[in-house]
Structure formats: C-alpha cells, structure tokens
Amino acid sequence: MTTKPDYVAIGIFAAFFLLVTVMGFWAARWKQSSEAMSLDEWGLGGRRFGTWITWFLVGGDFYTAYTIIAVPALVYAVGAYGFFALPYTIIVYPFVFAVMPVIWRIAKQHGYVTAADVVYGRYGSRLLELAVALTAVVATMPYIALQLVGMASVLAALGLQGEIPLIIAFVVLAVYTYSSGIRAPALIAFVKDVMIYIAVIAAVAVIPSKLGGYGAVFAAADDAFKAKGAGGILLKPDQFLPYASLALGSALAAFMYPHTLTGVFASKSANTIRRNAMLLPAYTLLLGLLALLGYMGHAAHLQLASNNDVVPVLFKTLFPSWFAGFAFAAIGIGALVPAAVMSIGAANVFTRNFWKAYVNPAVTPEAEAGVAKIVSLVVKIGALLATLYLPTHFALDLQLLGGMWILQTLPAVVFGLFLQSLRASSLLAGWLAGLVSGTWFIWSDGLKPIHHLAIGSAGLSLYTGLLALVINLVVVGVVHLATSLRANR
C-alpha cells in the first residue's frame, strides 16, 4: 500500500470526521432528561431509545470497524470458511428475540445496568457477580483495541503515518463520550450506518464490473486458493462441523458482551427489542456483501502487506479519491461508535459491580455517573496504549480468548431466567471449569479457535469456546446434582 498522502481523500475523511465530532458533543442535549445525571442516564440514555435508534445503535456496536476489515480479510485468506459470520448473525437474532426481552424486563424493574447486576439480583452471590463482571471487562478491552486497529489501517491507506492521527481521533472520541455518554454513539450510528451501506453497495456494484463480473471474481479466487494449496470458495467436508460450531458458539457469545447488552438495556421496551431482532438481519445481508470483497481482492490481483489491507486497498485502487475518502470515513466512524459503546459498557460494569459493590456501597447516583465517566476515559487510554505499543497479533490473540471467556458467562446470565433451581455455587464451578479448560485448549493449540478431539479412531473438530461451554454445563449439572443430594439428606 502506498504511503503517499491522498489529500482529496484526506479532505473528505476529515469533513465527515468533523461532522460526527460536532454531533457527538451536541448529543449531550439530545433527548436530555430533566433528572440529575446518573449511571442510568449517562450509560443507558434513560432507557428511552425507540426502535430505530436501538436498531442503529445495536447494529453500530455489533458490526464494528474491525468486522468491516477482518471479515473480508478472512475470506481473502481462507475462502468460504470466513463466511461463518453469516450463519452466526442469523442464529443470534432468534436468541435475542427470545431471551433479551426477559433480561430487559428484569433490568428495568430493578434498575440493573449490567449483566452482573442481573446475576447478583438473581442469586445474591457477590462471588458469582464478580466472576461475570471481571470476565466482561477483560473480554471487552481487546475488542476496543481492535477498533483502533481498524482505524489505523484506514489512516495508513490515506497516507497518514505515525501515531498522531490515531491519538487525535481517539482523544476526540474520549472527550465527547465523557460529555454525552451513550447518546453520542447512538446519534453518530445513524451517519455511520448510512455511509457503510452506501460504500458497500457501491463496492459490490462497481468493483465486479471492473473485474469482469462475478463469474470472473469467483474464478480468480478459486484459482488463487488452488495455487497456494489452502482455502477454497467451497467448504470441505471436514470443515462442516467446525464451521457450524464456530457459528453457534459465536452467536451465543455475542450478546453476553457489555456493549451489546448496553444497547439492549437502553431500549425503551421489550417490544422494541423484539422488533429489532426482526429488523437487524438487514445487517447480515450487508455483511454477506462485505465478505465478497475478500474474493474481489484476488480478482484485482492486489499486492498486500497484510490481509487486513484488502478492503482499504480495493477502495484506494478501484475508486476515485473522493469516494475512497468517503469509504474510509465510513470505516473510521465505524470504529468510533463501537469503541464508545464498549468503553461505556466496561465503565458501567466497573462502576456498578466493583466500585459500588466493594469501594463505596453508598455512592450517590450522580457520583456513580462521575466514576463511570472517568473509567470510560481510562479504558480508552488503555486500549490506545495497547494498540500503539503492543503487536497487533496480541490484541487478536486476546480477542480470541475473550470470545471464549465471555461465552462461559452464558449459564449464569441466561439460565437463571428460566431455571429457578440453579445455585450460584454450581454456576461458579461451571464458569471456572469452562474458563480454565477453554484457555488450556486454545493455548495448547497455538492460539487457534478450533480444537480437535480424538475419539478412538475417529475425531471431531469443534470451536473451542463451544467445547468449553459444554464442559461448563456438565460441571454445572454435576455440582448441582451433588449439592441437591447433600441438601436432601
């Protein structure tokens, strides 16, 4: 990728970035309540977001800048296997429709702000609450860093080298998030999503016409995979099970993260969430179109320093500078929205489940919001430092672990909504077993997401997070049965 600055693209990028910056600061007055600032107001917008705001907000923090960069990069690298993100996002919405309204209703009734609040309210166990909260914060941190990785790839495509542009972008993000809370990313998500739709639809319409059509695109990708002896435009039979397990495990984990739950808790009603579960698959269509850019990278015969460069280089090579600047602005703003929501979600967890639980139980609502604002700044600074001074693969490795870890909170957060007999001790034992076994599997497999199980002469390959969840559930069942038998003696 050339490092020569493209001043037309930079100008377009800067104009849109300035627009969303102004919107971010103005958002402090948008849907403002007459009530004193509280964590409920700053971190959840007073739980007043309707269908369209929630749709843009949840879509904005679910389909992140790194998703826009990483999904086509994975398809470019391995082919059909990279499309696991499509069934995963299809599976997740029935789960959202069935489960999230129940969690929302409980959270609204009791004033809960985080999943750990729900867990403590259900089981009365500080230890289980701490386990869920700690997992949430640790799993979210590398996710925020990956948004910076996506932003950095766009800045590099513009020819903006060095650390200063990235630092400026996230200082601005930090300041208006501190001021406006969840309202800033909710408002900016409107602009971001419209821009992403325009950029992707233009790409899938224009790029194939310049490369000889979709037939030529698929043929070029197939030839490229055959030449390197790995990957392919179709799944191989031995990939079916790991592909399906990766999709299922990712879907179950997706709405356990603090940032996705923050979007759910900010909704104004359970029906708002159900309507969004029906509307959000529109983003899956967008993601499918976006993934095709990975195949187009082969057809365009791009010379890439990294697979993550495929989308920026495609736009830079095949579009005029002004549209490339527009597309880069869409991706860059696509980093701001989820990074803001993620930092707010992590700040909510720290404030409610660490600060209030252990440091100052009598903290006032105003002081609670003040703590969350400061923590949101610290979280962003930590993610920025990690991006600047640690290798990119470190954030990738941590994110892989984070996805497996956050999945282990599913039984504690969700099962208690429907099974009244579960105990905190069994859920805590299951969480620990899943966390330890999953971490060991991933580490022993060289930080790969798929683990191979040898069963006699046969074998199974499964997503490690899902395998760890099975171990988690088995331990929950065994400990629950043992404690029930002991209690009945």
Image (cartoon, rainbow, N blue to C red):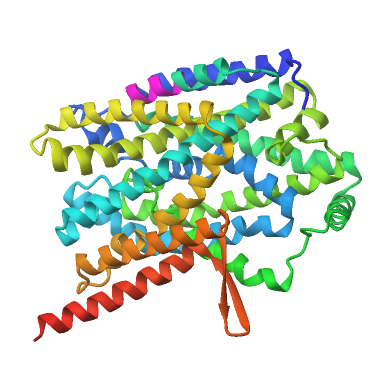
Residue 18 at what x, y percent from top left? Answer: 53, 16
- Total residue callouts: 0
Q: Quadrant of residue 47?
A: top left
Residue 437 visible in this rendered orientation of the protein: yes
Q: Please, is residue 196 above or below residue 249 in the view?
A: above
Quadrant location of the N terminus?
A: top right
- The residue at the point 55 percent across, 15 percent down is 164
- The residue at the point 53 percent across, 26 percent down is 388
Residue 487 at what x, y percent from top left? Answer: 11, 80
Residue 281 at what x, y percent from top left? Answer: 55, 54
Residue 197 relative to residue 465: left or right? right
Q: Please, is residue 368 above or below residue 479 in the view?
A: above
Residue 288 relative to residue 231: left or right? left
Residue 26 visible in this rendered orientation of the protein: no
- Is residue 197 part of the magenta span, yes or no? no
- The residue at the point 33 percent across, 21 percent down is 179
Q: Quadrant of residue 379?
A: top left
Q: What's the magenta bit mostly, secondary-structure-wise?
A: helix
Q: Please, is residue 12 above or below residue 152 in the view?
A: above
Quadrant location of the C terminus?
A: bottom left
- The residue at the point 55 percent across, 53 percent down is 447
Residue 45 relative to residue 144: left or right? left
The magenta-colored residue range is: 172-180
